[in-house]
Image: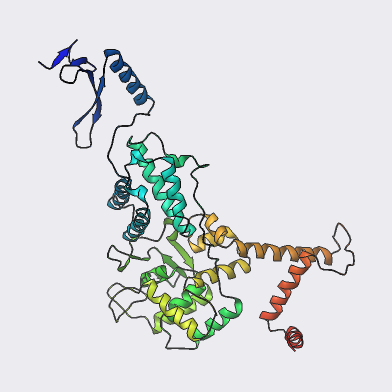
Amino acid sequence: MSKKRTRGNGEGTIYFNEGKKLWVMQYTLGRTQQGNIKRKTLYGKTRKEVKEKYEKLITEINTNNYVDKSNIIFKDLCMEIIEYGYKMNKLSECSFLRKKQTYNQICKHYMANMKIQDIREYDIKDFLSSITNYSNSIISKIYGLVNNTFKKAVRKKLIPYNFLDNKEDFFIPKSKKQDKKIRAFTIEEQRKLIYILTHNDNIKYKYQLLLGLSTGMRMGEINALTIDNIDMNNKVIHINKTITKNQEDKSIIGKTGKTANAIRNVPMEKETFNLLDDYIKNHYKDNKQQLLFYDFRKNDVISTAQVNSYFKRLCEKYNIVGYNVNQHMLRHTFATRQIESGVPAHILKNILGHAKIDTTLDTYTDIFNEYQLKHSLKFYDYLVENNLLIYEEKKRNYLDENDLMKLVLNIKKMYYQRDPKLLKLLTLLYK
């Protein structure tokens, strides 16, 4: 007989195992996902040692600090999160693809192949330093997925705590790359683009490009519009879907907008109304999906990439700008003109379909700052004209920072208006 029992073999019984020559006790932790009973076996050279281990176990369980041994690999739990999100319809096919790309970037580091319980602080710090070669937007996505993986590991009681909760030591790293600045067309470039688009009948995607410029809609939203989304009576565009991609990387119409806030109604200004009225009456063709814009050659939806590639070639052909361009600049240009005309941030947020006003402010911070400065100068001029200055302005033979900025803004205005005085002055300086 291999087991010598000191009392009954119920829950928490401590007995001596003759074969192992150790004192033993079993404790039921609960059940596995498959419904099987999950037990923890404690061993010790003495009965007292086993009892102490039992008391420590109970304390850890009651304080949520108990961690069961596990062989779960970090990347496997990471993928489990992604697949569950897709299965529960929380992720669209396009979002699922993007998450998998983020997952692949994580898997380039050795930490991804480690058991979660074996990961230490220096592994995480090495991982975080290794992703600084990506852009800040990609780093943010990687950090978010890693953080969610550790959070899930804590909930599953695989680890006692999430390292990334310590924001002082495990903060989101900053990219070595410089953030790309938002670039909109200047007024002169916009004039040139409008002229080219409106004076050439053979330009492909002409109406999509003009619609992006006049409404600030994303190109995916434009290409997903159906004829029923255009309410000419009430002069409203109903945006409720966007072009996305499925798991085969094929462009399809998504079931919803890019975000919850992307589902919105955009009022038609007079120019937008005239643009759509012209297109629907003279160019729209019926198709199986009732899309406003459709690729009849491929008998399919028009992808954002198609429009973007064409737009780049168009700008190069007509020398509209001397730098790399993309069709998303149409949205930035619309937003810039809105800010310049005095539209406040909270209104622009709704027009653009941003989820948070912080997105609007962060994206167009330079433009808002320039607008604020320009109007501060106007206010100062108003005080001068009405003799409302607290301190009388003194004559001086130098320009301070405000004067210099005011001068620059005035020169810009004169340049855009092709002021003959400025052109004459520039001609003299050039000679």
At horizontal 36% and vertical 36% (from top left) the residue drawn is: 159
Q: Is residue 19 above or below residue 201?
A: above
Question: Residue 408 or 133: which is nearer the viewer?
Answer: 133
Residue 140 x %, y %: 46, 53
Task: Residue 277: tell me if it is visible.
Answer: no
Q: Is residue 145 left or right of residue 10?
A: right
The structure's colour scheme is rainbow
At horizontal 54% and vertical 59% (from top left) the residue drawn is: 360
Residue 243 x %, y %: 36, 67
Residue 193 x %, y %: 53, 81
Task: Residue 121: tell me if it is visible.
Answer: yes
At horizontal 39% and vertical 45% (from top left) the residue drawn is: 148
Residue 291 x %, y %: 34, 73
Residue projecting furthest to the left = 1
Image quadrant in which the C terminus is located = bottom right
* Quarter where residue 294 is shown: bottom left
* Quarter where residue 289 is shown: bottom left
Question: Residue 4 or 409: which is nearer the viewer?
Answer: 4
Image quadrant in which the N terminus is located = top left
Q: How many marks?
A: 0
* Quarter where residue 259 is shown: bottom left
Q: Is residue 57 above or below residue 277?
A: above
Q: Is residue 338 left or right of residue 80?
A: right
Q: Is residue 409 left or right of residue 24?
A: right
Q: Is residue 279 left or right of residue 15?
A: right
Residue projecting furthest to the top = 6
